[in-house]
Image (spheres, rainbow, N blue to C red):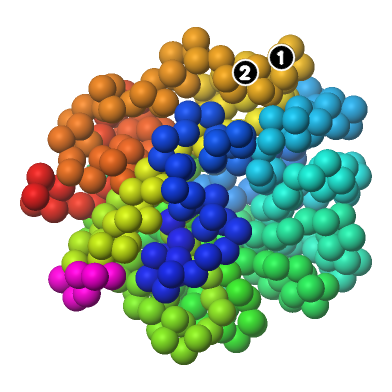
């Protein structure tokens, strides 16, 4: 995750302190010394929608889903491993009947909890219950305005229901944001999404690059071309700068493509070298992609993975060993490789001058396209000229 707002406007949110901690880049097992990773818990496979790009390929409930008791034990493990953030994802987390009990349980154990949801099931009462359960942030997926969103989500009326959900969350005093996944069919709607967050008073927007996992494996040809990605980034940067100039309290982030960091740096190196140096300092502190280091995923059956897009790489199961035991066991080759990836990466990533701030980007995208976990990330849109040593 790259906070464009933080890089360009030097803000300092809770997330920024996790992302840009001075020692972040040197960690092997978590976000900072003595802390565990941010954990995405795909707590259910069940979903009421059928989104085209769902990385979890969510559908009906899995019969082997962790029970409430097992889920509480997982939360206890995560709290004792000092996980800073537990992100409830799915499927649709609100379809678990015990969602509120588990969210309250996690908050009572000192975990900062975040909900990733399609937003369509949030009514006024649900929003109030989320607040009571101590959920600190609600990210609602919207992949366009109106019918564009509904086509992606496989459900007519999904946009209207999600927008109502967002309004109820805002009314309840919850921090809420939009999660928008860029692809060829919706990127022309970026200005409309920025207009929406202004009109609705939504304080945060995260722009996700497509990762070819789950059902998105069938969307590789629908991803943006490199020139389109650059144009999308230019617009995101321009809008973020505009918010900064106006003092509008909006947090804008890009997610799942660490080439965005060097791209922003290079753009400002031409316009404002001093700002560019500060941007580079923050990117260097962060260290780029941190799958298997500061990000972990646990699926509905309790399997642990290096991130939520690598569900086919299983490191262990929390029914057999605690999360902390699994996460600190470097004997698994994928985990060990992710923590010492420099010598394994090949192709353009291995010779890139920005490797220290990107860390080779997303391995699951390389694997989906080339069948090789350590190949270059095909979504890197920097030119050969840009990545060659200065
Ligand atoms: S070439 Fe690889 S390491 Fe360099 S910016 Fe692109 S994805 Fe990152």
Numbered circle sitting on residue 326: 2
Span of residues in magenta: 270-275
Number of numbered discs:
2
| CB at disc 2 and ligand 1 closer than 8 Å | no
What residue do we see at 42% from left, 73% from top? 9
Q: Nearer the viewer, residue 125 or 246?
A: 246
Q: CA distance from mark 2 to mark 1?
A: 7 Å
Please determine whether, in this image, residue 220 is positioned above or below residue 253.
above
The quadrant where residue 174 appears: bottom right
Please give the name of the residue rendered at 56% of the width and 45% of the height, measured from the top-left corner: 54
Q: Residue at x 46, y 82 (%)?
A: 243
216 w.r.t. 296: above or below: below
Residue under circle 1? 321
Instruction: Judge whether 356 appears above or below 117 on screen.
Output: above
Q: Using the image as rendered, state which of residue 111 and residue 236 is in the foreground.
A: 111
- Tell me residue 129's x, y (percent): 89, 60
Closest to the observer, 164 or 258: 258
Few, some or many C-alpha atoms within 10 Å of disc 2 (few <14, some 14-19, many ≥20)? some
Residue 282 visible, this orientation: yes
Q: Position of residue 215 (x, y in %)?
A: 52, 40
Q: Are marks 2 and 1 in contact (CB under 8 Å)?
A: yes
How crowded pointer 1 is (Cα within 10 Å; few <14, some 14-19, many 20+) is rated as few
């Amino acid at each position: 995750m790259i906070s464009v707002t933080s890089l360009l406007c030097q803000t300092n949110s809770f997330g920024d302190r996790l992302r840009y901690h001075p020692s972040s880049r040197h960690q092997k097992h978590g976000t900072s010394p003595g802390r565990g990773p941010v954990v995405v818990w795909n707590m259910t496979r069940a979903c009421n929608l059928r989104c085209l790009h769902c990385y979890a390929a969510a559908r009906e409930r899995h019969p082997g889903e962790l029970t409430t008791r097992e889920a509480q034990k997982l939360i206890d493990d995560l709290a004792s491993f000092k996980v800073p953030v537990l992100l409830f994802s799915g499927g649709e987390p609100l379809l678990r009947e015990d969602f509120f009990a588990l969210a309250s349980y996690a908050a009572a154990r000192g975990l900062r909890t975040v909900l990733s949801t399609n937003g369509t099931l949030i009514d006024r009462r649900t929003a109030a219950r989320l607040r009571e359960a101590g959920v600190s942030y609600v990210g609602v997926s919207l992949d366009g305005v109106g019918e564009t969103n509904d086509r992606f989500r496989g459900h007519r009326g999904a946009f209207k229901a999600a927008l109502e959900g967002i309004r109820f969350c805002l009314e309840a005093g919850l921090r809420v944001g939009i999660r928008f996944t860029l692809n060829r069919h919706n990127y022309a709607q970026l200005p409309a999404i920025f207009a929406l967050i202004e009109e609705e008073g939504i304080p945060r927007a995260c722009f996700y690059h497509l990762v070819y996992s789950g059902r998105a494996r069938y969307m590789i040809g629908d991803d943006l071309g490199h020139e389109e990605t650059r144009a999308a980034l230019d617009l995101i940067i321009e809008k973020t700068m505009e918010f900064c100039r106006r003092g509008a309290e909006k947090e804008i982030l890009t997610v799942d493509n660490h080439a965005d960091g060097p791209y922003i740096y290079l753009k400002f190196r031409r316009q404002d070298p001093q700002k560019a140096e500060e941007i580079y300092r923050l990117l260097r502190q962060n260290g780029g992609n941190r799958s298997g280091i500061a990000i972990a995923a646990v699926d509905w059956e309790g399997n642990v993975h290096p991130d939520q897009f690598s569900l086919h790489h299983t490191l262990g199961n929390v029914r057999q060993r605690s999360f902390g035991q699994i996460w600190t066991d470097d004997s698994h080759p994928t985990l060990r490789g992710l923590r010492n990836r420099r010598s394994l990466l090949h192709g353009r990533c291995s010779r890139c001058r920005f490797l220290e701030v990107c860390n080779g980007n997303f391995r699951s995208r390389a694997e989906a396209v080339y069948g090789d976990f350590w190949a270059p990330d095909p979504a890197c849109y920097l030119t050969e000229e840009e990545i060659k040593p200065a």
